[in-house]
């Protein structure tokens, strides 16, 4: 495996989350990073780990992404309990449809969060000179 190489097709999970965001309504946005995609809609955010491998992280399997989602929630709830709501599978139901949670085979996992004001991100605060040592 080469660093950054996509290890599994996530098209179905991505399409499901885009449709979920549409149904949620409100202002919608998708934030892409090297390791995840965050779907923002209304008051909710769903973070999907990319199916990739790097020497410093391994999200190459559904099981690895589940473990990473669970660890992220466990660690970040300590400092942001109102934001980190949990993690859930994107599961294929008996009829073939995808659902967040529920029965069926997990095709992927997401961290479920309460959406917060994007202007409170540290990079944006730093750009406008609002980030202080107390924040860090």
Image (cartoon, rainbow, N blue to C red):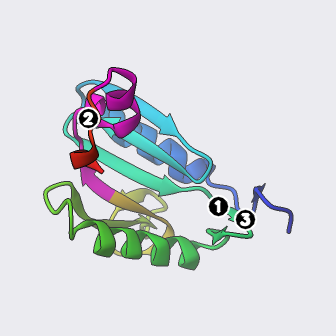
**Residue occupying the point 37% across, 30% down:** 126
Q: What stretch is highlighted in magenta?
A: 112-129
Q: In this view, does 92 lie to the left or right of 85?
A: right
**Residue occupying the point 72% across, 65% down:** 54
- Residue 134 is situated, as x and y percent measured from the top left of the image, at 21, 47
Q: Is residue 84 magenta?
A: no
Q: Residue furthest right?
A: 2
Q: How crowded is mark 3: few (under 14 residues within 10 Å), some or many (20 or more)?
A: some
Q: Give the residue pinned by disc 3.
A: 54
Q: Is residue 43 above or below residue 90?
A: above
Q: Give the residue pinned by disc 2.
A: 120
Foreground pick, 16 / 69: 69
Picture disc at residue 51: 1
**Residue occupying the point 48% across, 55% down:** 48
Q: Is the Cβ of the residue at disc 2 closer than 8 Å to that at disc 1? A: no
Disc 2 to disc 1, C-alpha distance: 28 Å
Q: Quarter of the image holding residue 122? A: top left
- Residue 14 is situated, as x and y percent measured from the top left of the image, at 53, 46
Q: Nearer the viewer, mark 3 or mark 2?
A: 2
Foreground pick, 40 / 80: 80
């Amino acid at each position: 495996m080469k660093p950054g190489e996509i290890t599994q097709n996530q098209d179905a999970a991505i399409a499901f989350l885009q449709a979920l965001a549409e149904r949620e309504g409100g202002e919608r946005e998708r934030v892409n990073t090297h390791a995840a995609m965050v779907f923002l809609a209304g008051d909710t955010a769903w973070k999907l780990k990319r199916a990739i491998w790097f020497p410093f992280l391994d999200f190459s399997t559904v099981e690895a992404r589940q473990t990473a989602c669970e660890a992220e929630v466990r660690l970040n709830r300590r400092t942001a309990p109102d934001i980190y709501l949990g993690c859930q599978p994107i599961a294929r139901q008996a009829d073939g449809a995808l659902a967040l949670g529920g029965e069926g085979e997990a095709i992927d996992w997401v961290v479920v969060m309460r959406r917060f004001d994007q202007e409170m991100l540290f990079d944006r605060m730093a750009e406008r000179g609002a980030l202080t040592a107390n924040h860090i």
